[in-house]
Image (spheres, rainbow, N blue to C red):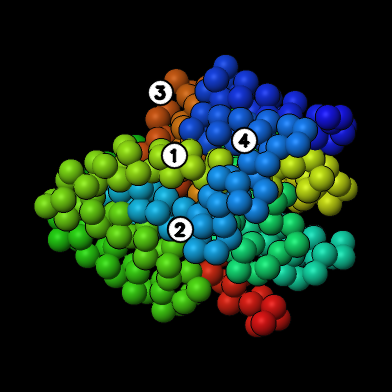
Amino acid sequence: MAINWKDLVMILVGILLIYLAIKKDMEPTLLLPMGFGAILVNLPGSVIAVDHGILAWLFEVGIETAEVFPLLLFIGIGAMIDFGPVLSKPWLIFIGAAGQGGIFISMIVAAALGFPIHDAASIGIIGAADGPTAILVSQQLQSNYVAAILVVAYCYMALVPIIQPVVLKATTTKKEKRIKMHYTPSSVTKATRIAFPIVATIVCGTLAPDSAALVGMLMFGNLLRECGCLDSLSNAAQNMLSPLITLLLGLAIAPQMSGEKLIQIETIMIMGFGLVAFIFDTACGVFFVKIANIFLKEGKKINPLIGGAGISAFPMSSRVVQKVGIEADKQNHLLPFALGANVSGQIGSVLAGGLLLSMVLPFVR
């Protein structure tokens, strides 16, 4: 059977994703199944993604109807996260909040260019750098571009190590990159670590009810980690549940990667909006720190690079900040602070998604 050019392009995209996963080690747990799935669904006469195909079933159960995969994935992510750095340095929370600015900037730009508000909000959430949140928001807002949003969101997440260094270097001076941060670990009691996920769930669920499911699963995973009586389940969530669900999620996205669905002008525009969101997320975090430094005394100033870790791409963004800092000064270790900002960004992205849902859902309904 003949193959049309759109399907051929997507097969080549699938091969590229597999190459990036294997050769460049870029999020292989996600990009490898996405790439292989893209090849499967674009083969001539392929039935694997039709109504009763296995990939279509994975998409329906895992993403479209029950939203099982994002919620289960957040349990694993929560079990991986150590909130100790942010609990010992609570001011890092503000960097995590500032790192969500690109979401709203991208949404405003998309709306100004004619996208309906529910589509604009769904496009903006790509800047959360958080796949599960992007899935939940775009699905609940009934966006017309769910396929493109999911693919673009996950591809850009994998490209964080390429995008962020460019933005960080462009928005900071040589002197700013060399600002030294001396980390003095302060003990966080076990009771505080256990109380935090419970209190955070109550507060976040009250402030943004539409984010309660994602925040709740994230914090439940963290409670597994911190409670001390379920270590085997915590380890399973980190080392088995999270990579397995990520792999299934990559395959579940595949039915949305057909040439007919993705090869269109709107997809190219969404790719542009996603890039804008990622750039401004990083820049907003950096400039927030720069403004804070105006009011801080010498010796107390914060390295603006840490602001770039305020996005939700955990722990990739932290590693990027550490790498750029080391390039500027080999004695400048920013990782402890970057991890705290990165963890704060994880919470901030979920809250931003809940806020968008609260703002836009009434228009959809």
Check disc 1 and report the residue beneath it. 315
The alpha-carbon separation of the residues under discs 4 and 1 comes to 26 Å
Is 226 rendered above or below residue 275?
Answer: below
The alpha-carbon separation of the residues under discs 1 and 3 comes to 21 Å
Q: Is residue 156 visible?
A: no
Is 130 rendered above or below residue 9?
Answer: below
Circle nearer the N terminus (1, 2): 2
Dot 2 alpha-carbon crowd within 10 angstroms: few under 14, some 14 to 19, many 20 or more: some
Check disc 3 and report the residue beneath it. 331
Q: Which residue type carries mark 1? A: Pro
Q: Which residue type carries mark 4? A: Gly
Residue at disc 4, secondary structure: helix
Q: Give the quadrant of residue 192.
A: bottom left
Q: Position of residue 65 (x, y in %)?
A: 55, 64
Check disc 2 and report the residue beneath it. 68
Along the line of sight, which residue is nearer the eye, 252 or 172? Answer: 252
Along the line of sight, which residue is nearer the eye, 210 or 181? Answer: 210
